Structures are given as C-alpha cells and as structure tokens.
Image (cartoon, rainbow, N blue to C red):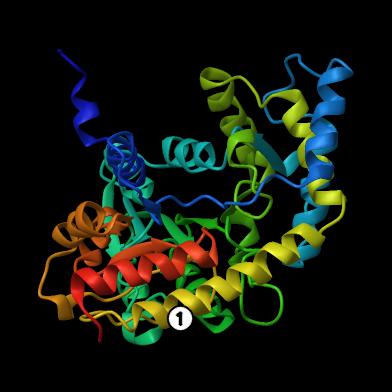
Amino acid sequence: MNLAKRMSNLGTETAFEVLARAKALEAQGKHIIHLEIGEPDFDTPVNIVAAGARAILSGATHYTPSPGIPQIRQAIAKEVSRTRGVEFSADEVVACPGAKPIMFFLILALVDEGDEVIYPNPGFPIYESMIRFVGGKPVPVRLPEEKDFRLDVDGLISALTPKTKLVIINSPQNPTGGVVEKQDLQRIAAALREFPNAWVMSDEIYRRILYVPGEHPSIVAEPGMRERTVILDGYSKAYAMTGWRLGYGVMPKELVPHIARLQTNSNSCVATFTQMAGIEALEGDQSSVHGMVAEFRRRRDAIVAGLNSVKGFRCRSPKGAFYVFPNIQGTGKKSKELEGLLLNEAGVACLSGTSFGANGEGFLRFSYANSLENIHSAIERMRKVLGAA
C-alpha cells in the first residue's frame, strides 16, 4: 500500500496491542489477569448514566456547536476556575470526544516542522507520536526513579531553546504515578518567561486521582502562564467514562476558534447526550469519585508491597494515577522480554516500560485498576515464575 510518508512517523498505544494478545490467549482457554490497560474497572456512576439516558430520551441526539453546548462549556469553566484558582469563562473551553483530540489539535495548531517540543519520557506515547507526525523535534526529559519519578526540572529548563514551541507537563503522570510539585511549577514558569514563544500543555487527566493532601497544583496559576497554557482534562479516569468519549481543553480565548476548526474538520462535535451526562458528572454527587480514589489507594498499597516481594523487582509508591512503574533490572531481563514472559507463563498482562519511551527500559507498567483479589493473584503467579525476593 502506498501510504503518505507521514504515516511512518505515527506511533501507537502498546496497551491495546498487549490487550489484543491477551485476548487471543483467553480465546485459547488461558486465564489472564489484566494489568495492562489504563481504564478504571468501575462502572460509570448511576447519576451520570441516568442523565445521559434522559438526554437521549428527550431528543438530545443532534449536532452541536463544535466547541460544545453552552451548558457544558460553562460547567467546565466553573469547575476549572474553582479547582485551579484562576477565573475562566465558557468561551475559553472546547469539549472534545475524549481528551486525546486536545493534544492532537494543539500540536497540529502550534508546531511547525523543526519546532522543538519538550515532553516527559517515559510518558504517554501519543505525545511523541504526534510530535513526530507533524514534523516537530521531540525533546525528552527524564523522570528520575530516585525522586519518585518527579519531573527533572533542571533537565527541562536546560532543554529550553528559542526553538521550543511547546512544553508538555503531565501530573499525576502516566506511566509512573509521579507528581509535579508546586515549587517545580514555579521554577518552570520562571524559566519559561525567558522564552515567550513557548506554550504549555498541562495534561491533568489524573488530577482527581491523587494520594497526597490538597488540590493538585496547575502551572496555569503561575504568573504569566494563563496566557499560554492549555489545560487538558476529561471524564474517562475520574468518572469511569472511558467509553463515553468526553474530554476538554481550557485555553486562551484567541486559540479556541482554531482548535474548534480542527474539530469541525475531524469529528464535528461531541454527542449531545454525552455532554449532558458530563454536566451531571461535574455538578452532581461526587461520592463515587472519592470512593474510587480510596479503593485505588488500597490497591496501590497492595501492589507496591506485592511487587517488592518478587525477585528482581524494586517498586516505589506512586503519589497519583493508578499505575506502578517497578524497576525490574534485578531480573536480568529486558523490559519487553519480561512483558512477554509474564503474559505467556504467568498469565499476567502488563506493559514494557519502553512502550512509554526509551527511558522506560528497565521498568514495567502495571495498572492497578483491577480488584484486590486479582492483584494478589497476579503477584502470586509472578512469584511462581520469577521467585520471591
């Protein structure tokens, strides 16, 4: 097939490839414990489902404006203003089918061929994929294990150049569960003031899944950052709404028409009833979110203790999200090799750290969005294959 050259620059999410291999083994009768996919194992809360169902039955099944219906844009602006300590208006919001379109559209809108984009590595693989797709230059920044995978701020600052067009910050972070602290954001913001052409994409999709006290800080609240920061957030993780496809970007008003135009040219708009459900998610009962995070905390503690009991593993306790990123160098195996071994011999699906960039070699990612029972069972299977610590 004679594809366009740009397609060779487009990456993928390995989680879905491993999921396909795991499903193939299940079809052969093998029992697999799924710790590879980044999806809450909870159902969407009943009040949100009811709001979506009412919307469908009332005829909310037609096109909407590309940036979203006014009600959801207002609800998002109100929520983001409250949680980030910065006032936003509805006309600074674009609702999308999932949060990924925001990173896709933003990189398309801002990054020209040869422009540099600083991003975390290991990090969400679509960052690097999209940077390469548009002809940008990926500039990776480490997340040191010895600092609980907190972003290497010195490395980020030293990577800034006049060619830097975008800086991507993800906190709490996928795949490590690392968290960027307020003093880190202050230093990054101070450095960025010397590079006025550089924008920031603050990926805050795991903001609600946090195990440290207080609201998670956002760089948008730092002096001079509101005017060039795009907040990426959504509903998939906090509200277990992965299949609903609803996310959003909050950005300077002058950028909104360009992002909305990209949406018009690609997927038109978000389903109306999904947007109505999203309003209920933000404005309705939040007890389901609190309960889910409390359960994730219990699972985090269990999987960290369990992985540290496996021979050759060393696992730090994440401060957010629902992933652990254990160091597996003590096994003497490469990450991809061990991913395959655990799937085929232990029946445990996980991801090689290299799925998240070159700096992920020597690590695996496990999602603990699964039951405590399955987590304990997975650890026992791994100990049988690899031995006890």
Question: Helix or strand or loop: what does disc 1 sit on?
Answer: loop
Judging depth in this view, the residue of 196 and 26 nearest the camera is 26
Judging depth in this view, the residue of 304 and 27 nearest the camera is 27
Residue 122: horizontal and vertical position, in percent?
A: 31, 63
Residue 215: horizontal and vertical position, in percent?
A: 70, 73
Q: Residue at x 38, y 63 (%)?
A: 366
Q: Residue at x 45, y 66 (%)?
A: 375
Residue 141: horizontal and vertical position, in percent?
A: 31, 67
Residue under label 1, please give it.
317
* 77 is higher (above) or lower (below) than 64: below
Q: Quadrant of residue 275?
A: top right
Three-letter code for the amino acid on which mark 1 is drawn: Ser
Quarter of the image for the C terminus: give it.
bottom left
* 79 is higher (above) or lower (below) than 208: above
Q: Residue at x 34, y 74 (%)?
A: 143
Q: Quadrant of residue 255?
A: top right
